[in-house]
Image (spheres, rainbow, N blue to C red):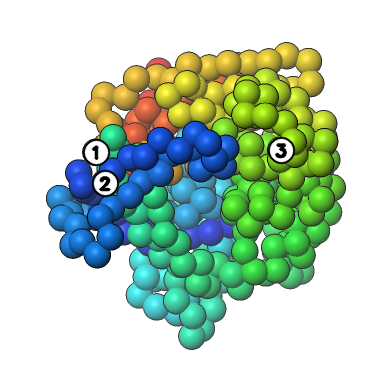
Amino acid sequence: MKYDFITIGGTTEDVTMYTNEAVMIDNKRNILAQKLMAFEYGAKIKIDKAYSTFGGGASNAAVCLARLGFKVAAMVAIGGDNRGKDVIDNFRGHKVVTSLMQKKAGEQTGVTFFVVGKDKEHVGFSNRAANKLLSIGPKELKALNSARWVYMTSLSGTWKKTLNQVFKTKAKVAWNPGHIQLHAGFKAIGKYLAKTSMLTINKDEAIELVITNPKYRNKDNRFLNNIKNLLQAIYEYGPKIVVITDGPNGANAFDGETFYHQAIMKEKRRQDTTGVGDAFGSTFTAGLLLYDGDIQKAMRLSVKNTASVIAKQGAQNGLITKKEILK
């Protein structure tokens, strides 16, 4: 079977709790944690509402791409629990191929708890659970070699082994690395970046990655807060396209020749930002396929989808169809 996309990474149940009692703290002295969300120590915090939905980078990307009309399979690991069964049903409901999913008996399916403040930004607490046991064998390699693109998200467990196998395949690789990969730094992931067709991360993640390079470790905050500096520093390691999202300031990209910028599209209402990065990155990759590599057109599609995601609760409920996004 041939695929337009295979997504690789995490799948979770997302439990999202909304509260107006979070206190936002400006922490610009710490370049890696410039804004903090805090609560009174020892207090019981009032939750205004709570929801249980589906999430995880590979899961969100798979549903996004399937809704855009592509043939998509999700290569994720679930536990032998009811949560895992629900993940399968959700994929099937969105026409995501489930034959590459891996069921890990005796394990729990991943879960993330999100706390959303009054500005609709969030902090997440994640238990990777079965996601840590994702592996790639002959069956998976055969499928990956039949795909036009692999969209890879946060990895855990034996993640270096997974990267080695993915980058041996014929597929183009779009990569949205997770905290573990970013924390490992250029020394650990530089050789994979050199083989990446499209890298997408947010500004905070870009700073975290760039300062792992000794060349930039002692740069001041002014340098590190400059998007063009970050794009160029990451591009030096070889990704063909680097994309950095910057919240309300929009998104930026660099292909070695041209810097691109795309302003956000104002959402109808602001519900929460969960899954926005996944929606942007996967839609951008879809746009590259739809528009024969046109970066600016791909970015326009991405902000349209992210505006829809922000306007609805959860990471997947606001994802729009190909017909809707091309209007």
- Residue positioned 28% across, 35% down in the render: 119
The residue tagged with tag 1: helix, strand or loop?
loop
Q: Amino acid at mark 1?
A: Lys
Instruction: Work out how far the residue at label 3 is from the one at label 1, CA to CA, in angstroms.
Output: 31 Å
Q: Amino acid at mark 2?
A: Ala
- Residue positioned 68% across, 42% down in the render: 209
Of 235 and 138, the residue lying toward us? 235
- Residue positioned 79% across, 21% down in the render: 256
Residue 311 appears at what percent x and percent y? 29, 33
Q: Is residue 39 left or right of residue 247?
A: left
Mark 3–mark 2 contact, CB under 8 Å? no
Is residue 143 among the parts visible in the rendering?
Answer: yes
Instruction: Work out how far the residue at label 3 is from the one at label 2, CA to CA, in angstroms.
Output: 30 Å
Residue 111 appears at what percent x and percent y? 41, 65
Q: Amino acid at mark 3?
A: Val
The 10 Å Cα crowd at callout 1, few under 14, some 14 to 19, many 20 or more, is some
Is residue 300 among the parts visible in the rendering?
Answer: no
Q: Which quarter of the rendered picture does the N terminus lie within?
A: bottom right
Residue 314 appears at what percent x and percent y? 33, 46
Find disc 1 in the rendering and name its residue: 118
Find disc 3 in the rendering and name its residue: 210
The mark nearer the N terminus, 3 or 1, is 1
Mark 2–mark 1 contact, CB under 8 Å? yes
The residue tagged with tag 3: helix, strand or loop?
helix
The residue tagged with tag 2: helix, strand or loop?
loop
- Quarter location, residue 100: bottom right
The 10 Å Cα crowd at callout 3, few under 14, some 14 to 19, many 20 or more, is many
User: For the residues carrying marks 2 and 1, which lies nearer the camera in this image?
Assistant: 2
